[in-house]
Image (cartoon, rainbow, N blue to C red):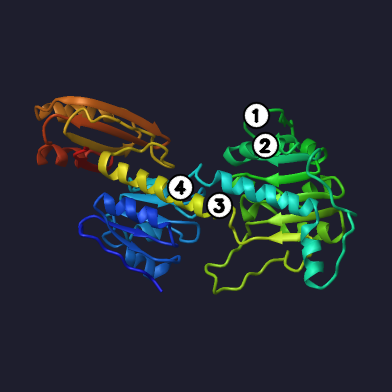
Amino acid sequence: MDEHERGDAPNRRALLLENIHPDAVDVLRGAGFSVETADRALAGDELAERLVEVELVGIRSRTHLTEQALATAPTLMAIGAFCIGTNQIDLLAATRRGIAVFNAPFSNTRSVVELAVAEMIALTRRLTDKSAAMHAGVWDKSATGSHEVRGRRLGIVGYGNIGSQLSVVAESLGMSVLFYDTADKLALGNARSCGSLEELLESVDIVTLHVDGRPANRQMFGDEELSRMRPGSIFLNLSRGFVVDHGALRSHLESGHLAGAAVDVFPSEPASSAEPFVSELRGLPNVILTPHVGGSTEEAQQDIGNFVAGKLVRYVDQGSTALSVNLPSLDLFEPAGPYRLLYVHHNVPGVLAQVNSLVAGHGLNLEGQLLGTRGDVGYVISDLASPPPDELLKGLEALEATVHLRVVRPS
């Protein structure tokens, strides 16, 4: 059952889907938004209907904001992905419409790290086997096959926010850490960078994936990579479901080449708890399966709710695009004038000169200005001492480079 919540500001509407933390609702309502919520993902006509006249929309991983969906939301100014990934959003379509997209790249890092550590310990100690035996009435006190993680070699594929923090925590447990990343990354502590993925796979006891969702990572881990892992090693994937060939993983687990695995993400995931979970990895006693809960702790969801909602409010009220996924990152912290002109445009030569010529032509003084570009799009923040007349706004909207224009009065 959906829950509908509306405040006292009908002209500022936000839609939050997929059971986003209540703190996000509080932040938006505190900023004067009427907030409508739903505890599930939406799609098709239902999503289109709910996007009408909405300025902000917040989603997690299951709602897909495609080009067709965005076309039904003419008043949409910003999208909040209350998670790390943004693959469920057509970023090019959002950018073409001047819609800013924000996510939470850091808020659930610790939660994912702790789950990875817990799973490494559980598999290394064979806790899944011991627990299953106990539930079956078998008292097996043998230490055979159970090991400490201290002294074992951990291989981290992807040394970003999560991978690097896991590196530090793993070292505190006495593990030796090797990592591989396609980009040059500074090693933390005593961690050592490997020159190739093959070098890492052949050198460690545990392999854990923490890569992003770029298309190049699709099926990056298949039979060849799994075959290179040391016999008796452990495999974890808490990154993206499509990066691993699950059929090949099952084969290596059944053959005994791998001692165990823990998987939190899957190539195809149910849209809701009412749908069955289907996977080639089901039924294997040495595999821990979790329903994409790496970042799903109450602490992480609360942090994400506050962080992303705060970014959305700052963009709407002040034009700040700091940490935006798709627009140039700009932030005029202290308003230099009472009126702020926010102008998203195609990244072509001469746009700033055209903007300033129009502003000067209407006798307005610029109190402060920032310009940034990112790929095919540019963004200009201009603080004005006087309210911009309608003729100026019409002139700016008529420019060939214009994508989106609005005026705010930042407090």
For label 4, the residue is 303
Q: Tell me the SS state at disc 3.
A: loop
Q: How far apart are marks 3 and 1 (CA)?
A: 23 Å
**Residue 90 x/y as whole percent:** 44, 52
| Residue hosting label 3 | 295
The residue carrying pointer 2 sits among few (fewer than 14), some (14 to 19) or many (20 or more) residues within 10 Å by Cα, namely many
Identify the residue at horizontal 31%, vertical 52% (top origin). Answer: 28
Is 207 placed above or below 353 here?
below
Q: Between disc 2 and disc 3, whose residue precedes?
A: 2
- Identified at 58% across, 48% down, the residue is 111
Inspect the image, locate mark 1, and give the three-letter code of the amino acid beneath it. Answer: Leu
Examine the rendered structure and indicate whether residue 406 appears above or below residue 34: above
Q: In the rendered image, which quarter is residue 128 located in?
A: bottom right
Can residue 218 be seen by looking at this rendering? Answer: no
> Disc 1, disc 2: CB below 8 Å?
yes
Decide if residue 205 is on the left or right side of residue 321: right
Give the numbered dot on residue 306: none
Find residue 167 and name its label.
2
Give the CA distance from mark 2 to mark 3. Answer: 17 Å
Label 2's element? Answer: helix
Give the CA distance from mark 4 to mark 3: 11 Å
Q: Position of residue 346 (x, y in %)?
A: 33, 38
* Image mark count: 4
Tell me whether circle 4 and circle 2 mark residues in contact (CB < 8 Å): no
**Lower sequence index among marks 1 and 2:** 2
